[in-house]
Image (tube, helix red, strand yellow):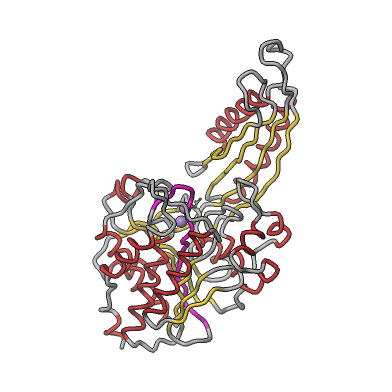
Amino acid sequence: MASSWHNLRIDIDRLRADIETLSKIGRAPDGNLTRHAFAPGYEEARRWLKSRFAASGIAARDDAAGNTIGRVGPETGPTVMSGSHIDTVPDGGPLDGAFGVLAALEVARVIKEAGLSPPRGFEAVAFIDEEGRYLDCLGSKAVTGALDLARVAKAKAPDDALLVDAMRGAGFDPARLSEAKRKKGEIAAYVELHIEQGPVLEAKGLPIGIVTGIVGVDHSDFTFYGEPDHAGTTPMDLRKDAFTGACEFVSRMRKMILRRGTPYTRLTYGIVKSKSAAANIVPFEIYLKQELRDTDQKLVKRLVKASYKLADKVAAEYRLRVEYAHTTGNTAALMAPRVQDIVEDSAKSLNLPAHRMPSGAGHDAQVIARVADAGMIFVPSEGGRSHRRDEWTDWKLLEQGANVLLQSVLRLMHAA
Ligand code: GLV
Ligand code: MN
Ligand code: MN
C-alpha cells in the first residue's frame, strides 16, 4: 500500500466547484461576502458543507461548539485532523479559511475513494468563529479545552450582539460548549492549509510555505471619556476632547512599537467609534479596538501592559478619563518540527520548492498546537491581498497546495 498512496492526487475540478459554490453562500447582490459565525449565511454554508460530505458517503456532524467535522478511516481512536474556517471577516475574500476546509474535505474524499485502511482516522473540520467576531478561534479553543467560560458569557460582537444569543439562534446551547473538548491524545496531529495572506511567497516565486510559528494576538478595548461641550465657545485649552487624546495615544503607541517592537510586531486600531454625532460638539467618548501582534508572546504581553500605562498617561495630560480591558486573543505558537518536516517531504515528493516562514496571521493551528503536533502549509496570495474581496490565488497554486496537504495527511496517518 505504501507505494499506492504516494501516487494519490486531489481532483482540482471538484475542489474548484466547491470553492466557487461556497464563495456564493452568504454573498450579497453587491458582491459583499460576509459570513459571520452562527449568522444565517453561515448556517446555510454549514448545511451545504455537510451535504458535500454526505454526497461522498462521509459521516459529518456538528459538535457542541458549532464546529463541523467529517471523518474517514477508523471511526474511533486517534485521528489526524485538518481544517480551517468558513466564517469570514466583513466583506472578506473567498479563500481565507474556506480553501483549507474545502481542501480537507477533498482529502477526505480521496482517502475514502482510494479505499485505504490507514491505522488512524482523518477528520476534516470547519472551526467556528476563527475570525473572532465574538471570540477569536472559538471553535478550536473549545476543542482543546482552552475556553474561558466566564469570557464566553460576556463575549460580544462589535455591534454588541452576544455570542450566547447567536449560538442559541443557530440551535446551539452555550451551556454545552465544553462538551466539544476532545480527549487527550485523540488528535494525533494537525495540519492546516491556508493562503499566505501576505506578499512573501509571491515575491520569492515559490509555490509552498511551511509555517514555523504563528504570531500571538492581543485584543484590548480602550474608551477615552471627555466632556460634550460647545465646539465654538469652549477654548482649546479648556476643552476635554476625547478624540484629540485618543489620537495622541495612537500616535505615541506607533512610535513605541517602532522603537521597542521586532520586525514582526503589528499595531492596529481596526475599530474606532465616536459617540458624538455633530460637528459642533467636542468629541466626548471615543472607543478604540487595539490589536497587537508579535511572534514573541512575552513581548506582546509587555507591549500591552505598556499600552495601558500610556493610556493612563495621555488621559491625565488631556484631562480625560480612560477605561481599558483585554478582551480576547491568541497565544503565539511554534509549529511542530515533525509536521514541518513531513510537509517539506511531501512538497519535495511533488517537486515543489518550499520556504519556511512565520505567520503574521492568526490560525486555528496555533490553538490546536497546545494539545497536538501542529503544522501549516501556505500557498501564495495574489498581490499579498487578503481580508478584502479581491483576495485571490491562481488555481494551479491552489491545486499544488492541496496535493501537499493530501500527501502530508497520508504521511501523518501512516506515521508511527
Ligand atoms: C485571522 O484572520 C487573523 O486575524 O489573523
Ligand atoms: Mn484564516
Ligand atoms: Mn482571516
| Left or right placement of residue 272 versus residue 33 in this view | right
**Residue 338 shows in the view:** no
Q: Position of residue 8 (x, y in %)?
A: 28, 78
Q: Quadrant of residue 10?
A: bottom left
Q: Where the N terminus falls, by quadrant?
A: bottom left
Q: Is residue 59 left or right of residue 9?
A: right
Q: Residue 361: percent from the left, percent from the top?
A: 47, 51
Q: Position of residue 267 (x, y in %)?
A: 54, 39
Q: Magenta part of the protein: which range? A: 78-93
Main secondary structure along the magenta-highlighted residues = loop
Residue nearest the observer in this picture, 56 or 207: 56
Image location of residue 380, percent across then percent down = 33, 53
Point 49% across, 79% down: residue? 79
- Residue 346 visible, this angle: yes
Q: Is residue 70 left or right of residue 308?
A: left
The image quadrant that residue 173 belongs to is: bottom right
Q: Is residue 342 left or right of residue 175?
A: left
